[in-house]
Image: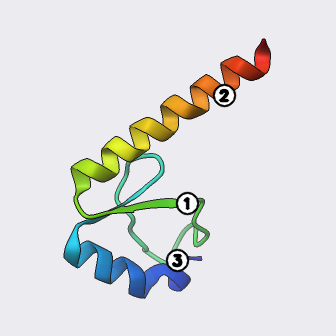
């Protein structure tokens, strides 16, 4: 849930960046979805974006391997 990550998010954002696994900013508006489906924490936003790209590549590779 968002409130479980709030303190850590504040610290990591001060040092770098936090993105959701879909590449969007981690924002809690507390009016919609409250459950997190994962996030990436890194010292910079570009590094977080690279991690997300690597995760997507691994997911694609795993899906192709599972079909074979």
* Residue 40 percent across, percent down from the top left: 43, 59
Alpha carbon distance from label 2 to label 3: 29 Å
Residue on which the image places disc 2: 62
* Side of 30 where 65 appears, left or right: right
**Position above or below: 3 against 36:** below
Using a 10 Å C-alpha cutoff, classify the residue at mark 1 as few (fewer than 14 neighbours), some (14 to 19) or many (20 or more).
few
Q: Viewer-proximal residue, 22 or 68?
A: 68
Name the residue tied to disc 1. 38
Pick the residue in front: 54 or 4: 54
Q: Which mark is residue 15?
A: none
Please tell me whether mark 1 sits on a helix, a strand or a loop.
loop
Is 27 left, or right, of 38 in this rendering? left
| SS at circle 3 | helix
How many numbered marks have been drawn onto this rendered protein structure? 3
Disc 2: CA contacts within 10 A as few (<14), some (14-19) or many (>=20): few
Q: Image quadrant of residue 43?
A: bottom left
Q: Is residue 37 left or right of residue 30?
A: right
Q: Which residue is mark 3?
A: 2
Is mark 2 in CB contact (under 8 Å) with mark 3? no
Q: Specify the quadrant of the image occupied by residue 41.
A: bottom left
First of labels 1, 3 by sequence position: 3
Nearest to the observer: residue 43 or residue 31: 43
């Amino acid at each position: 849930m968002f409130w479980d990550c709030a303190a850590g998010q504040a610290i990591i954002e001060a040092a770098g960046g936090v993105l959701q696994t879909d590449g969007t900013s981690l924002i809690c508006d507390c009016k919609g979805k409250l459950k997190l489906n994962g996030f990436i924490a890194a010292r910079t936003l570009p590094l977080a974006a690279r991690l997300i790209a690597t995760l997507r590549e691994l997911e694609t590779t795993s899906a192709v391997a599972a079909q074979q």
